[in-house]
Image (spheres, grey):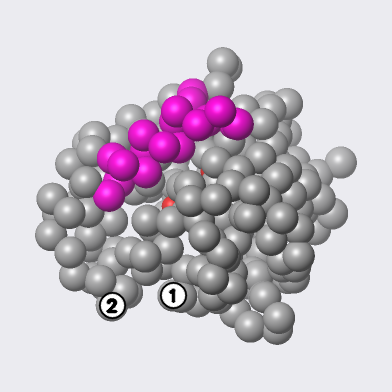
Amino acid sequence: MSHVIAIDGPSGAGKSSVSRSVGRRMRFLHVDSGALYRIMTWQCLLNKIDTSNPEAIAEFSQSVEVECIPEEGAITYRVNGERPGNAIRTPEINRHASPVATVKAVRDRITQWLQEMTRFGNIIVEGRDITTAVFPDSPARFYLDASAEARAERRRKEEVKKGIADQSVEDVKKSLLTRDKIDSTRKHAPLRKADGAFAIDSTSMTLEDVIETVIEALPDSWKKDLK
Ligand code: DC
């Protein structure tokens, strides 16, 4: 049976950097579950679906097909043969993703895609409900958090570096907090720390410290291939 490392936490807590690095060192495929919610949102917007209408989103979501391909240490996605790239990282997608992610039919479909990814082997999956709803039985579950200021600063730097946007830290923080609120108060699989998940506050930790903390906490029998 494949092993699963599950990492949840709010936006900008460092989940992507941490899970990519831990995945590389453990030789576990990195799975970005947020990208699937972003793809759903992107497809809704391209097809002029009203993202304030849950019924319309639910119906449309059943027609979206995503191809999952293991490639260079990660699961990559294609929609109609196309890689989504930065089209799913824009402030517009940020704004619409949380409402789309509240829709149960969307969550059920993406949860099934994620659970089926164990067919590719050992995986490290990051998101908002991985420890609570997608892989609640994994012995390696983490909740990564940081202060809102630190998260906004990191997200802003990332957006500028990728050339996606150049918003002020205040605007990034506002957008993060709005999304956190929707993600943690929604009815279906809200963001929360799961009972038994290992909590890490990365506000004043380096990326390397967080990576070491996660690896240290993994079951010893999983670490035979550690690089
Ligand atoms: O991690 P991210 O910012 O790329 O996530 C995009 C959106 O998807 C965000 O609003 C939260 C939502 N999401 C979710 O509800 N459940 C997940 N497992 C991952 C992301």
Give the amino acid at mark 1. Asn
Where residue 140 sits, quadrant-wise, is: top right
Q: Which mark is residue 140?
A: none
- Establish if 25 lies above or below 145: below
Give the amino acid at mark 2. Gly
Where residue 49 sits, quadrant-wise, is: bottom right
Instruction: Identify which residue, 120 or 67, lies in the foreground.
Output: 67
The residue at 70%/34% (across/down) is 135
Q: Which mark is residue 163?
A: 2
Instruction: Identify which residue, 110 or 8, lies in the foreground.
Output: 110
Residue stretch rendered in magenta on the structure: 175-193
Residue 119 appears left or right of 222: right
Circles 1 and 2: CB atoms closer than 8 Å: yes
Residue 93 appears left or right of 24: left
Instruction: Identify which residue, 106 or 19, lies in the foreground.
Output: 106
The residue at 41%/37% (across/down) is 182
Q: Which mark is residue 86?
A: 1
Mark 2: few, some, or many residues within 10 Å (few <14, many ≥20)?
few
User: Can you say which quadrant of the picture contains the N terminus?
Assistant: top right
The residue at 52%/60% (across/down) is 50
| Residue 37 screen position, x and y as percent | 57, 55
The residue at 46%/47% (across/down) is 98
| Residue 208 screen position, x and y as percent | 36, 47
